[in-house]
Structures are given as structure tokens and as C-alpha cells.
Amino acid sequence: MDSEAEIENLEMRLLLETIYLRYGYDFRQYAHSSLKRRMLQCLAECGISPLSAAIPKVIHDRQFLDRLVTALSVTVTEFFRDPLFYLALRKQVIPLLATYPFITIWHAGCATGEEVYSLAILLSEEGLYERVRIFATDINGQSLQHAKEGIYNLSSMLESSQSYLNGGGQHSLADYYHSKYDLARIPSGLKENIVFAAHNLATDHVFSETHLIFCRNVMIYFNKELTNRVLHLFEKSLVSGGVLCLGSHESLSFTAVEHRFTPISREQRIYQKKVGA
Amino acid sequence: MTIPRPRAIVIGASAGGFLALRTLFPVFPEGFPVPILVVQHQPAQGSGPRGCSLLALHCRLPVREAMDKEPVQSGHILFAPPGYHLLVEPDFTLALSIDAAVHHSRPAIDVLFETASDVYQTGLIGVLLTGASRDGTAGLQKIRQRGGKTLVQDPQDAEAPFMPRCAIAHGAADQVLPLNAIARTLKQLGNFQHE
């Protein structure tokens, strides 16, 4: 081991191990390359080089640790990302959900909440919102707080208006927020049936039986082992016939739970847990 | 300059890129023994057929968008999906991310080039084509720093000269070539044995 890249990778392993041993935050099973990019970017902003110089700093400087953990765990998303997915959800999943008297939904890795509220809007247009409870979870406390507040840049909201319509929206996205200056606020009615809670997919367990699990573009940040752990959690949480929604370029192929699910929409990565599985 | 057969080829293109790739792709013979990874800047939510499915019509190799966690494969041309960065993992699988745009782009050329250079090191060829962005320069520099080789399209030959010019100005190009010469060079790479 003597190439620059290999030495950097060693430094990164030591730093992740340090963060875990000192504070219990476990990034050791995250996908390597995106984590490394985020880490190097955060260290560059703090003027720290080489990577291993962050090890003593992380041990003694809690503020720096918080900054680094935030940089490593924040994810960003948008309202109605992948409109065709939402269209498939309306056409192929809503009729299924409608057969349940009460519907429990787990939105795992909800980040700052854009996709949770997208789902809430869709459910209310389909007449199901009164019958649902959505557990929206994330590992990052700041993201959760943002999601709970439900205040977004008006400009990003306007950019999503067309996605909302392409996703089968029946009104105008502007009907679902109050705008003031350059901000858009989600009204409390849309938050009523959403419970925001901290949950760590790497270490925590199943907390409820669910009918629908949303976990889109979250496991792309995990390695294969952690991805399989998470998929086992989902498989355990879902009722027979429950539905799992992944991101548009994620797949159950070659995962440990592939045989437990059948695709509802191969194209949109919507899967159903086999009955009796 | 002869270059030994690389372990992977990464290609970045922006404005004018689809036309350039259409010229480039037909030179690869069936069973080309090197994996090819591509970032072409494009809007996240295009309607109609995706650009890469149109390019597949002009190519003997399979061309498609990469899936998260799939293994890199020789003789396949995999594109970063619109709206996602494409990264190479140390176990030679591909990863996607929806991290912030780099140089206003997601996918970004730099993200693919930098992560691929960490994994393939001296065995990587980076190719930067036409475009009107600064993206790709830092990625090419990283490839050179790790011992890989870089080819940049001659700005005079590029539909949008800014991107190749930027790379050349920053000393990130091993060779500056018109598109047809880049095509010939890449085709020949398949004939050489591994280092």
C-alpha cells in the first residue's frame, strides 16, 4: 500500500473508526466514494489537510465533529422528484392502499421533508389522507427539524410545479403552501398525520407494522451489507402484500430480499412483498 | 504516443456532446475489452426518449443508464442517469448520489473522473469533449495526478470550445486531439494488452 489513493483510504478508515469509537456515529458501512467526497469537501472548507489531521480534531472538538457529521449525513431532495414515479403510485399503489381501513406508512430517510409532503399531497388528492399515519424518519436531527417546520424556498417550490402536474397532480402545487416573501410554508393540515422521528437505519430496529415504505435514494449512500440490513428491516416491517418504493435507479436485484418481493412497476422500482412471505 | 490498454475509460461531455458521442461510439467493436463510463450533462427531467437510448442505435456495444451498485463491465457503455452523480467504488461497482450539483451540474464530470481515478489510478483514460462548462478540469487533473492519461478535444474542433479550453489552460490535457483522432486512439486502446 503506497499509492496516494490507498493512503487516503486508510486515513478515511481511521477517521470513521475514530468517530464511531468516540461518539457512536457509524458511517463505516456507507458507500465509500460519495462519503469520501463529502468528507474531503468539509475538511477543505475547514482548512484541514491531510485527511488524518482531522482525527485529533474530531476527538477533542465537539463543534467540529457536529459539523462533520452534518456534512456526512445531510441529503437533499425536492418536491415530486421523478414525476412518473408519483404517477405510477397513483395508478398502481393507491387502489391497493385503499383496501385497508387504516394505512401506516414509513418514509425512511425523509431528509428535509419535500418527498413526505409530496406523498401527503398525493394521498389527500386521492382521498386517503384521513386514513393514514406517516412515520417520517431520518438520522439527521437538523434535517428532521427542517422537515417538521415545513418551510421551503419559494423558488424551489415553483420549480417543482411542473413535476407535480406531470406526477398526476389535480390542482396546482401552489394550493398546498402559503407563500410569503420568498418562502413557502406547508399548512398544518398537511402535517396532521405525519410523525417525524429520529431513526438510524444502521443501528435501530423496526418500530411498527407498515403497509407502504418509501425509501428513495437513501440506500445509494450505503454499502451492500448495510443495504441488505435495511432491506431486511423493511421486509420485517411490511405486512404481506405491503409495498416498497425505491429510487428510480435502485434495484432489488442481487440483494438478499429479492425473492421476497414481486415488482408492481419494474420501471418505477415499486415492489410488493409476496403474500405469505 | 502509445498507451497500454487501460482498465477503464471515462468520458465527459456537455453542450454539443450528444453529437460528439454519436461520432465516437460507432468506432468501438463488439466485445471491446474495456468498460466505458460517461457523464453527459442534461436536464434532470427530460420528456421523450433518453439521450443514451438514441445513442445505442449508433453503437455495437450495449449503452444504457447505470444502476446503483451494479458492477462495472467491460464492453458496456454506462451513462450517469439524469439527476444523479455517477461514482466508482473501490470494489469496482458503480454508485449514484444526489449530492449537490458541481459546476451547476448533476451529473458532474468531476465526480465521475475523481472517483474513477482513485480506483483505477494509472489504468484510467479520461476524455473531455465539447462543452460550455468548467466541469471536468479538476477531474482530469486528478486523473493525471494518479498516473492516468487524459485526452481533450481540440477546442477548434468542438461545437462548444469552452470546456476543453478550460482543461487545456489548466494543464489538464496529455493530448489535445480532434474528435476523429480521439476515436482512433480509443479504438486502438482495445488492442493493447494490460500493463
Image: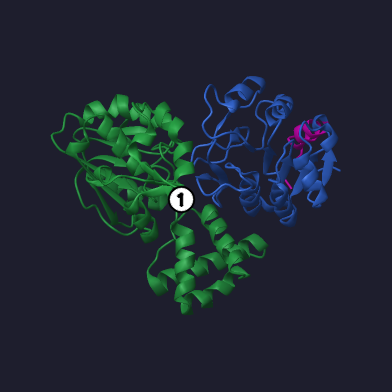
**Residue at horizontal 45 percent and vertical 36 percent from the top:** A160
User: Which stretch appears magenta?
Assistant: B181-195
- Majority SS type along the magenta span: helix
Drawn side of residue B130 relative to residue A142, left or right: right
Drawn side of residue A251 relative to residue A189, left or right: right
Image position, residue A264 (x, y; %): 32, 28
A26 to B34, vertically: above or below: below
Image position, residue A166 (x, y; %): 42, 27
**Residue at horizontal 33 percent and vertical 42 percent from the top:** A117
**Which image quadrant for residue B18?**
top right
Which sits in the foreground, A113 or A275?
A113
Please indicate, yes or no, whether residue B147 appears anywhere in the rendered image.
yes
Tell me the kind of residue under disc 1: Tyr
**Which image quadrant for residue A44?**
bottom right
Display colour for chain B: blue
Q: Which residue is mark 1?
A: A221
Which sits in the foreground, A87 or A185?
A185
Q: Chain of mark 1?
A: A
Which sits in the foreground, B188 or B20?
B20
Quadrant in which the N terminus of chain B is drawn: top right
Image position, residue A164 (x, y; %): 40, 32
Display colour for chain A: green
Instruction: Estimate how packed mark 1 is, as few (under 14), some (14 to 19) or many (20 or more) residues with alpha carbons within 10 Å.
Output: many
Residue lying furthest front: A181
Image position, residue B133 (x, y; %): 70, 42
Residue lying furthest top: B57
